[in-house]
Every structure is written in C-alpha cells, then in structure tokens.
Image (cartoon, rainbow, N blue to C red):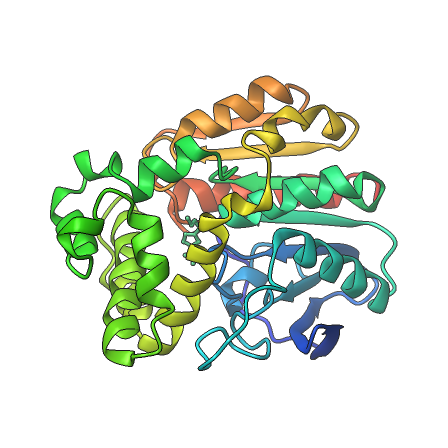
Amino acid sequence: MRNFYPEIDPYDFGLLDVGDGQSIYWETSGNPDGKPAVFLHGGPGGETQPNHRRLFDPAKYRIVLFDQRGSGRSLPHASDAGIDLSTNTTWHLIDDLELLRQYLRIDRWLVFGGSWGSTLALAYAQTHPSRVSELVLRGIFTLRKSELDWFYEGGAEAVFPDAWEDFLAPVPLEERNMLIQAYSRLLNDPDPAIHGPAAVAWSVWEASTITLLPTPNVVSIFSDPHYALAFARIENHYFVNRGFFDDGQLIRDARLLRDIPGVIIQGRYDICTPAVTAWDLHRAWPEARFVMVPDAGHAFDEPGILSALIDATDRFAAGPT
Ligand code: STX
C-alpha cells in the first residue's frame, strides 16, 4: 500500500485575473523543472488543500493546485452577498485552465481529478486533448440526470435514510418532489436565516456519505457556514444547469481520449458517485487502465483509493513526459 508523500509547501503562488471580475488562487510545489501536473478539486465549490500536493512525488513533479472560480482562496468567494454565478460555468473553468497553463508556461500537463474534478478533467481533455499528457481520474462523475437523481432526488436515501432526513429538513413539504430546484431557491434567498441552514444541510449530506466509514472531521469542515455556503451555492448552480452539458456528453465523447494514457480509479462502495458511471466510462474508453477498489467509498484519502492514486502518479512520473 502506498501512502502520502511528505508535507510540502508551495515554492510559488498567486492570484490570476481570469476576467469577469474573477481571480483564481494558484500555487506550485515540488520540482520547478519537473513534469507538470494539475490537480482539479471536487464539488464544484470545494477547494484545494495541502494534502493534495502529497499525491505527487515532489522530486519528479511540478505540482499545480488552484481553486476554481468562487471557491477556496479565489475571489470573489461564492459565499459573498449578491454573488453572481452567471460567469461560473464548466466552459469558463476550462478557459481558466488554459489561461493558467499559459501563464505558468506549461505546454502539456498531467490532469488529475476526482469526483467533480473528474468531470472537469474529462471536459477539459475532450476540449483540449493536445494539452493533456495523462489523465488520472477517480470517483467518476459525469453529471448525467441519472447521477444527480441518485444523490439529490432520492436513491442514495436507501443507504443513508438517517442523513437523508437531515437533508430534507430545510425544504418545505410541497417542494420535496424537486429537491435541487428547492435548494436553489433556499440557497439564493438573501436572508441568512434561510440560506445559512440550507447550505449546511446540503453540504453535510455530502460529507456524511462520501466515506466508507463515518469521519466526524469531514462533517465538521463541511458544517463551517462560510465553506458550506460557497460549496452548496456552486454545486447547486452547476446541478440546476446539468453541468452545462448535453446529458451523457462526457461518455458519448470519450473516444476523443483514445490517445491519452489514462487511469480510472473507483471505490466499489462510493455512494456519492456510484461505480456504474466509472464502468460506463471504462466501456467507452477501454484504453485506460481501470481499477476498482473493493473496500472504499468516494473520498480521495481512503486507504485503497489513495494507494491506487499514488501508484498511478508514480507510474506516469517514470514514463515519457
Ligand atoms: N459532488 C461530488 C464532488 O465532487 C457531487 C465532491 N464531493 N465531495 C467533494 O467533492 C469534496 C470532499 C472534494 C469537497
């Protein structure tokens, strides 16, 4: 079993103005002359954290982390009053990736993404295949209606009926037949007494269900009102808009990935993004190596997932850039 590389600090960081009044936080760590790799965080609306650097051998990689629009240390933060998410779409994030790549003078990079990060990685690679040297994907999520229905409209409820009650709690009875829509209203209500509890309930549902075993630490991070509001607002905005994709688009267009070396890593007991999506991607992109971890859920730092991820970045570090 492989484990995290040692803790490491960035050797450079900054805010990049990407237009539309938005600046994104970025940082680089590891070897400045190493093989470039970019980490795409989840949500959308999550953020990068120091442990994400530790998925890459710092002697071999130039490791790029950044917070997507509205998230983490990027500005403005989606928890701000009166935030406008109309310039926050998948296609804006893909343009941001291209701006950041050029700003850092990188020609091609390994693209690493889990969960929503896998969605964004697939969309980016299908749009700019020549810029992607390899793909490392885990907890595959493609925002199909079936995937959103499973996790947000009843489905996963069958496995987590207790947590589901807490997810329903802020929603008036008459709106419970369309929960993503109901939450859109609640999260964008200007009254903090309305959007605050809704944001925490939305985020805690995810935090309670993403690990195979309960992790109070994850739940407590997701309960922080500032974090929860940005996370919930951005996720909900993307889900109301079905990721700004045609339904099934990322699997349909998987043939565009044929020439990119890739790995698909999936936890068998992933409740947030169930294995069927990873399997559909595997069938559509058989050239990629497929790893089903038998004893893991969704989170990147569960032992079996973490080991498979680091095995994947190690193997690609050894190969040609
Ligand atoms: N959201 C899936 C996702 O991308 C439906 C995701 N879930 N949890 C996370 O991301 C973080 C723990 C990375 C915030």
Q: In this view, does 5 lie above or below 133?
A: below
Residue 83 coordinates in the image, percent (x, y): 51, 76
Q: In which quarter of the image is the N terminus?
A: top left
| Left or right placement of residue 203 versus residue 314 in this view | left
Q: In which quarter of the image is residue 21?
A: bottom right
Q: Where is residue 90 in the image (x, y as percent from the top left)?
A: 62, 52
Q: Is residue 166 above or below residue 275?
A: below
Estimate the x, y position of residue 172 in percent, counting from the top left.
Answer: 16, 57
Which of these two is toward me, 79 or 10? 79
Using residue 73 as the reference point, say whether residue 232 is left or right of it: left
Residue depicted at 11% across the width and 48% down the height = 162
Up the image or down, 14 lies above or below 283; here it is below
Numbered circles on residues, count: 0
Who is closer to the viewer here, 249 or 282? 249
Does residue 165 appear anywhere in the picture? yes
Which residue lies at the image location 34% right of the left edge and 72% below the top edge?
189
* Quarter of the image that includes the C terminus: top right
Which residue is nearer to you in this view: 35 or 124? Answer: 124
- Asked if residue 139 is positioned above or below residue 62 in the image, the reply reads above
Q: Position of residue 313 (x, y in %)?
A: 64, 45
Q: Which residue is drawn at 67% across and 61% down?
A: 58
Residue positioned 80% across, 43% down in the render? 128
Left or right of 137 in this view: 26:
right
* Res 260 quadrant in image: top right
Quadrant location of residue 221?
bottom left
Residue 1 in view here:
no
| Nearer the observer, 131 or 12 | 131
